[in-house]
């Protein structure tokens, strides 16, 4: 599952931005940078597609010219010219391909330079605080949990009784584990904050709570299975 990162940050700021007034501007600047970089990538992607289209058109034209040349000759002369024509075609094809690779490499270099220039424009931007970054990461992890849980919960709609309870608990465990994995992988991002220790401590605290919830759900499933066995339903 892929979240819309930009929209997630905006939703977060709408809800909690007032708590992190100084960091809100930093996060908004990050969104601007991401938008700018995307615009640059889209621009060069369009140029690469146009270059590829030009290459394919040029190759098709060479093929057409070669075929028309062969058809305009008699059978005997066509056979004699065949080797010469094929050699000419191959040389022109290689030349077009070489130009394509050179221009493509040039576009890649230009794209990298523009992105680097854009990043340098924002290099003096203040770094977000550890607590604010941790809060944003936790908020994002909750969206992952919510989306995953809602998705799997639909599978339990047709079930009833104990089977439905068990299905819902299993779905919650899956969603919580995804949230836990996301938080664990995002911990390294704390190094980019003003105070990495506070950021990691807050994430560790949240991960501990999630682990406890997972254990509780596992116990509830075991209890449910025991009740089913003992009571017979």
Image (cartoon, rainbow, N blue to C red):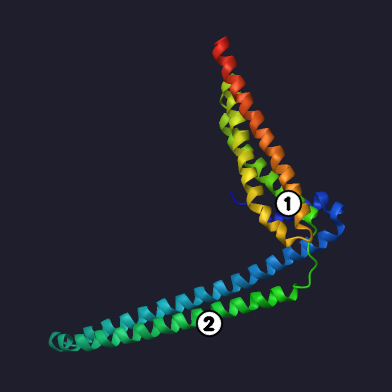
Provide the secondary structure element on which disc 2 rests: helix
Q: Position of residue 209 (x, y in %)?
A: 72, 38
Residue topped by disc 1: 200
- The residue sitting at 40% across, 81% down in the picture is 97
Q: Return the x and y of residue 159 as percentages of the image width and height.
A: 56, 24
Q: Which residue is labeled 2 in the image?
A: 106
From this viewpoint, which residue is outermost toward the top? Answer: 231
Q: Quadrant of residue 68?
A: bottom left
* Residue 6 appears in the rendering: no
Horizontal arrangement in the rendering, residue 112 relative to residue 52 (left or right)? right
Residue drawn at 80 percent across, 53 percent down: 131
As drawn, 198 above or below 37: above
Q: Is residue 116 visible?
A: yes
Q: Residues within 10 Å of mark 1 (few under 14, many from 20)?
A: many
Q: Secondary structure at mark 1?
A: helix
Q: Residue at x 75, y 72 (%)?
A: 122
Q: How many marks?
A: 2
Residue 49 vs residue 57, the one in the foreground: 49
Direction left: furthest residue: 76
Q: Residue 113: image x %, image y %?
A: 62, 79
100 in relation to 45, above or below: below
Q: Which circle marks residue 127 in the picture?
A: none
């Amino acid at each position: 599952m892929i979240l819309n990162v930009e929209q997630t940050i905006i939703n977060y700021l709408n809800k909690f931005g007032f708590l992190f007034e100084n960091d809100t501007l930093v996060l908004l600047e990050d969104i601007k940078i991401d938008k700018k970089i995307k615009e640059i990538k889209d621009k060069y992607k369009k140029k690469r597609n146009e270059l590829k289209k030009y290459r394919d058109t040029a190759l098709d034209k060479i093929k057409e010219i070669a075929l028309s040349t062969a058809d305009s000759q008699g059978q005997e002369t066509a056979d004699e010219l065949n080797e010469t024509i094929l050699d000419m075609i191959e040389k022109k094809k290689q030349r077009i391909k070489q130009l394509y690779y050179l221009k493509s490499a040039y576009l890649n270099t230009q794209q990298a330079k523009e992105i680097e220039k854009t990043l340098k424009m924002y290099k003096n931007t203040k770094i977000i605080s550890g607590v604010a970054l941790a809060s944003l990461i936790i908020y994002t992890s909750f969206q992952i949990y919510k989306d995953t849980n809602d998705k799997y919960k639909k599978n339990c709609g047709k079930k009833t009784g104990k089977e439905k309870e068990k299905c819902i608990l299993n779905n919650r465990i899956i969603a919580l584990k995804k949230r836990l994995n996301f938080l664990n992988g995002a911990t390294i991002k704390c190094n980019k904050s003003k105070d990495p220790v506070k950021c990691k401590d807050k994430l560790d605290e949240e991960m501990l709570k999630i682990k406890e919830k997972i254990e509780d759900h596992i116990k509830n499933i075991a209890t449910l299975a025991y009740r089913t066995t003992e009571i017979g339903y």
